[in-house]
Image (tube, grey):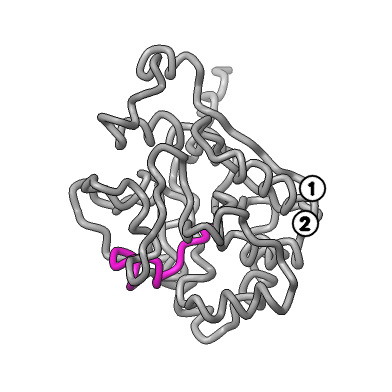
Amino acid sequence: MANAARRLDMIDIAPAFTSADAAAMEARFSGVSTQDMLAELLTGELKGRIAAVSSFGTESAVLLHMVAQVDKDVPAVFTNTQKMFGETLEYRDELSERLGLTDLRVFRPDPRILAAKDATGLRWSYDPDGCCDIRKVEPLRRALLPFDAWISGRKGFQAATRAALPRFEIDDGRLKLNPLADWDKDRLEAYFAEHELPRHPLEANGYPSIGCKPCTSKVLPGEDPRAGRWRGWDKVECGIHVPETPGEEPAF
């Protein structure tokens, strides 16, 4: 009797989420408060599948506090580019302790890549896109491998390129949440005051948006909150937040 043909193992390589899923989420949570939306998703269908990515910048405490109120075990991912302000690293530790975050994950650039592509540590001065790619984008790519979704702290008011930011979008097959997309500065300030959250120590010195030390400068009155990032360069994002189709300008 002939043996039955062996059943082939199949690997599902379909993305966890699609643009249709993001659109459905956008409609589903239209009019739902940020806190209620996070509570439903973090304790429901995204539990164990999502991480909160944070720069621990001037506004990061609001979103991290909301996440911690729902589930302190949600992983918080921080990419240490090794070009950060010391004040940011101190604030990261202080805020994590204050909020009781149980799973802070710090990812750094691959030292082999640094040795090959930025041995002098000066790539930021002549190729900021390349510097961001090896120091921030690549580490975050590794950090997100275990997850189907992630949370971003972007807000629509931060820059003209973010004005139409949705709450849900797709990024490399993952669902990306922008829970504070429609929040303005006054609302953030009220939340800081209500919950007595600590402020980033550099904020009072004229830094409303803080990235790596070499590429962050003070912002002048009346300027975009992100005007101090990569000043003098035709660059507005580090490369983590990119359009779905290469070459397109971001719609958000």
For mark 2, give the secondary structure: loop
Residue 169 horizontal/vertical position (percent) = 41, 62
Mark closer to the chain start, 2 or 1: 2
Q: What is the three-letter code of the residue carrying label 2?
A: Lys
- Rendered position, 70 above or below 171: below
The answer to whether residue 221 of the structure is visible from this angle is yes
In magenta stretch: residue 158? yes
Which quadrant of the structure image shows residue 63? Answer: bottom right
> Magenta region: which residues?
152-163
Q: Is residue 143 left or right of residue 22?
A: right
- Rendered position, 133 above or below 27: above
Q: Are marks 2 and 1 in contact (CB under 8 Å)?
A: yes
Instruction: Give the residue displayed 55% in from the left and 53% down from the top.
Output: 150
Q: Is residue 97 left or right of residue 213?
A: right
Q: Please tell me which residue lies in front, 61 or 165.
A: 61
Which quadrant, please, contains the N terminus?
top right
Which quadrant of the structure image shows residue 199? Answer: bottom right
Q: Please tell me which residue lies in front, 14 or 231.
A: 231
Q: Which mark is residue 72?
A: 2
The answer to whether residue 10 of the structure is visible from this angle is no
For mark 1, give the secondary structure: loop
Few, some or many C-alpha atoms within 10 Å of disc 2 (few <14, some 14-19, many ≥20)? some
Residue 180 horizontal/vertical position (percent) = 52, 70
Q: What is the three-letter code of the residue carrying label 1?
A: Thr
Residue 25 horizontal/vertical position (percent) = 49, 71
Instruction: Provide the residue designation for mark 1.
Output: 102
